[in-house]
Amino acid sequence: MPLGTMIRRRSYQGFSCPRCAAPPDPARRTSGMQTCARCGGAYEAEFFSPSAPAIPATIPVPESGDKITPCASHEANPAVAACSRCGHFICELCRIDADRMTLCAPCFDRLSNEGALPSAQTRFRDYAGSTMTSALAGFILWPFGAIFGIAAIVYAVKALRQKREFGDEGGYVRLYLYMALGVFDILFFGTMVAILAFGVLK
Amino acid sequence: MSPPSGRRLLGTYSYLGGRSRVYRTAEAFEVDEVDHGHVTRKRVFFDDVVAVTHHRFIGWVFPTLTALGVAFFTLLTAVLAAKGGSDLWVALSCFGAPAVLFLTAFVLRLALQVDVVTVYGRRTKVELHFWFLKARARETFQDACRRVREAQNPGTPS
């Protein structure tokens, strides 16, 4: 098998052998020790049966005789809310509650693609990683210590803010250490420049 | 779609394409895949889990790379030792020390292996790697099973 194929990450196909990714025999799905039929590897597994989300396609209209407002997308369904963005009437099927807004599906897609819904956002800048890289780069490449040191401090502040937003319980000490290393980078650069300057002046 | 609250870092692991950080929140496992300065997040909700597994493996990438490191630095050390010279000990320690480090990593990997806890959701999966903390791997496996049971069978004692 070519290395590129081995490195390339396979698309997820559901539960498979954790060793060789072979699909398991559905008839032998009992929790406990398992042995893969293909690779012969052993692993412990516990299986679960998650229930499918039960959303009816058509919501029954109450028989009160009152005139109901239909959903803009599903005429048979009564509207339960109006979209916070476009104002279209939406039924229980269409309704998406996100970030204190009630949205229809197209508006949810648009806002999440624009990054306007923090809870639906799945891609972020890695400020913690940038902090580490900058701090270490400033230490190794000390002639650029001032630039990397300042970058490390700025990234560390952003990373700390990001961690608070994410609700992270740990990892703060590491960031403070990298911030301190950033300060050290700047001081070390300043000291070396001073030593060299005095050396040249003498 | 609620914002994450109280994330706890369970573990990190690196692979050939990048690095992953795995967190546990009140309702899901979150995987932050770090790739070129950006983090891509995916979640496996407890009520969406189909299986949790635990196994131990050696792998082939790490042992191969460390073995190559041992071979390379040992060869260099041997060549320098054969040549001799006044700074022989400096040269030997420069190339011998990395060889010892690679050998240590190689032997540790073979001896300890890596514990892997995998949580399979309906649409994605989460992998947690534990090299040294075997007890923590076991705890994580049991904790994951317990949380999934509680989420999928509320009210049932686990």
Image: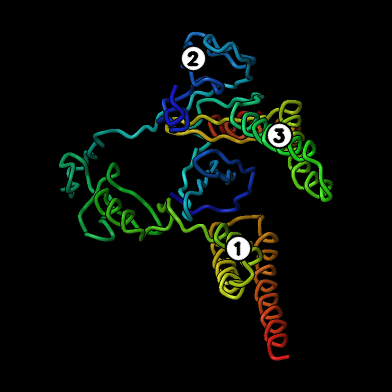
Q: Residue B75's mark? A: 3
**One can see residue B143 in this view:** no
Q: Amino acid at mark 2?
A: Pro
Label 3 and label 1 in one chain:
no
Circle 3 residues within 10 Å: few <14, some 14–19, many ≥20: some
The residues bearing labels 2 and 1 have C-alpha atoms spaced at a distance of: 47 Å
Would residue B100 appear left or right of A72 to someone viewing this image? right
Give the secondary structure at mark 1: helix
Q: Amino acid at mark 1?
A: Ala
Label 3: chain letter:
B
Q: Residue at x 73, y 35 (%)?
A: B74
Q: Is residue A188 above or below residue A66?
A: below
Q: Amino acid at mark 3?
A: Leu
Give the secondary structure at mark 2: loop
Q: Is residue B34 above or below residue A46?
A: below
Give the camera-side residue of A154 and B127: A154
Whole-percent x and y of residue A161?
56, 66
Q: Residue A24's mark? A: 2
